[in-house]
Each structure stands twice: as C-alpha cells, then as structure tokens.
Amino acid sequence: MPAELLDFEAPIGVLLKEIDALSLMPRSEARARDIARLKRRVDEMRRRLFAALTPWQCVQVARHPGRPGTLDYLDRLFTDFVEIHGDRRFADDPAIVCGMARYHGAPALVVGHQKGRTTKEKIARNFGYARPEGYRKALRAMRLAEKFARPIIVFVDTPAAFPGIESEERGVAEAIAHNLREMSALAVPVIVVVSGEGGSGGALGIGVGDRVLIQQYAIFSVIPPEGCSAILWRDSNRKVEAASALKLTAPDLLAAGIVDQVVPEPLGGAHQDAGEAARLVDEALVRALADVSALSVKQRLEQRYDRLRRMGRPDVDFEAAAAGPSAAPPLRRPSRSR
C-alpha cells in the first residue's frame, strides 16, 4: 500500500497499484481507457469513504504527514514574507513561524505552527510542539502588527504545547494564558484557520480571533484522543471511542459555536491537492477578513468578547449561535464598580 494512504484507504491503494502497473506498460488507446476507468473508480471510492468518515478517521486525516502546513500556505497565498525570529527573552522557536507578508497586495502578519516534512525538519521544528518562547515570539509579532495596523492571519496545526520539563520551567502555561488575554484585546482583525490538528492549549495559545475557520477534515480538541482515553479509562487503545466523545470534528465544532465556518477540502483531503486546498482557504479568508475589517475597533472587540463569553454557556442554543451573531442573544461586557 502506498505510504501516503491511510489505513482505511487500503481499497484505494489496490486500484492505484493497478494504475501504476498499467502506466508502465506500452501506451495504447485501450490501456488509456482502462487507466481512466480506474481513476474514476478511485475518485468514486474516495468520495464514498470521505463522505462517511468517523471521528477517528478525521484525526488520521488531520495528522497526515503530507497535509499542507503554514509554510505551504505562505508560498501559495502570500508574497514578500519576512520572518520574525526570537522572543527577546530566551530563544527562537522553529515550531511557530511568524512574519510580515502581503496578502492580496495588502500588508499582514502571518503566524502559524509548522511540523516539518522530512525527519530532519520534524526534529528541527519539534514536530510542531511549541515551547513558551514560541508563544512569546508570536505575541511580540502580534503587538508589532497592532502597532502598524496590520491584520493577523493565524494557521493552527499542533498536537499540543511541548510538555517537556524545560518547557514547564520556562513557564509554558503562563505564556499561553498571557497570549489568551492579550489576543482577546488586540485592536486589529485576527482570523484563525485550524488547518490540521488543533490540540489543547498549544492551539489556543495563538488561536483567539474574531473568526475561527476550520478546514473540513481538521480537528480542534481540548486533548488528543490518546491522552483522553489514557486519563479516563487508563487505556490508550480506546482512542477511537475517545475521538467520538470529544466532538472534535469540524461539523461538531460548528454546531457548538466553537468555530465560525468550515472550509471545504479537495477530494481525499488537503494533502491530495495542496494548491486547491490553498485556493479554498483563500476564498474563506478573503470573506472573513473583509467582514471583520469593516467593523470599528470597538465593535470588533465587543464581538470578540461576546463570542468568547458565549462558548460553553448552557443556556445558549449552539446551533443558532453557529448560524451567526444575530441568531443568538448578545452578551454585554460586565460593568466594573470602583
């Protein structure tokens, strides 16, 4: 079975091997028709499989090693990128990429996790597990963007924040909490795209925004399924059950009001056609950025605050909230008595 296929795609792998074998044989019209027929069968089978993915299968797609990352979207959607390094306190963290760029000709800040592709890149990027200096670097860049009135576009794709002892010693929990507070008060538009794994506090550390978009097969969860099953049942093998219980798929998150829009992906997932995936993300980004940029700073901050406060409220119809801000009753910032 080809390495790029997931285990539930095994039937597709059989057809792809047949196509490869026919492609190596001398060309003829009959053989070309056979290859075209097999390719149509591959598309049909892939369409059926991806129309009925289980939550655990969505997790597998979100973790696919070929899935486009922040640098892939930077190459396809942005120009004139200039990377920002270091948090001015300790070090640079390659697991988070930050930099100024131009988006459709206008200046913007891009922030995102980067996992790496090759073994060497994965080790250098710490497999997308960001350390506290990564979150502090991101906030430093965001404050710079706010100073120059540049919108912020964030790509989230991380299993979690790095849990190592050195990360704890340097205050990873404080760095994430600080980012949550500061990002909620940024005066410029902030658009978040969950493009792969949205894992725990590692995702939230750069994931507060005016609009949160999620790709069709991406996930967003308080904890990975393996960790959830290990804690609840002391059995990591119950990860499939945990994935279902966590409600981490894009439709579940939209219904709960956690995300604002689901961005479609190419047939078979974003890793099948990174260019088409970028085009679909681009369409959603343009609309979201235009909507948020049209608001005044006061309106933007009030809506961002209301959006965050509405999450998890037992008296809110989350399906109505997901339909739009006018469908759910607004929350008002509480007055502070002196």
Image (cartoon, helix red, strand yellow):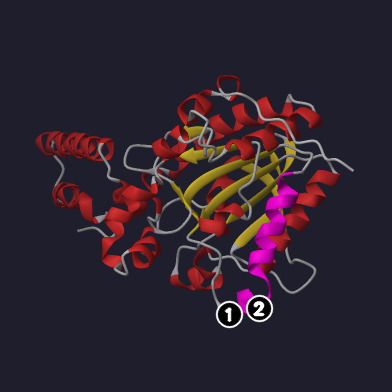
Residue in the picture at 80% in, 36% down: 335
Q: Nearer the viewer, residue 314 or 110?
A: 314
Q: Which residue is mark 1?
A: 165
Residue in the picture at 69% in, 29% down: 292
Residue in the picture at 39% in, 61% down: 228
**Amino acid residing under circle 1:** Ile
**Residue 169 numbered mark, or none:** 2
Give the magenta-colored segment's residue range: 165-184
326 on left or right of 273:
right
**Relative to residue 209, is residue 225 depicted above or below?**
below
Point out the image quarter for the C terminus.
Answer: top right
66 on left or right of 99:
left
Instruction: Tell whether label 1 touches label 2 (CB within 8 Å).
Output: yes
Find the distance from the CA under tag 2 to the CA under tag 1: 6 Å
Residue 167 x, y percent position in the rendering: 62, 74
**Amino acid residing under circle 2:** Glu
Q: Nearer the viewer, residue 292 or 181?
A: 181
Q: Is residue 173 magenta?
A: yes
**Relative to residue 89, is residue 255 depicted above or below?**
above
Residue 197 x, y percent position in the rendering: 46, 53
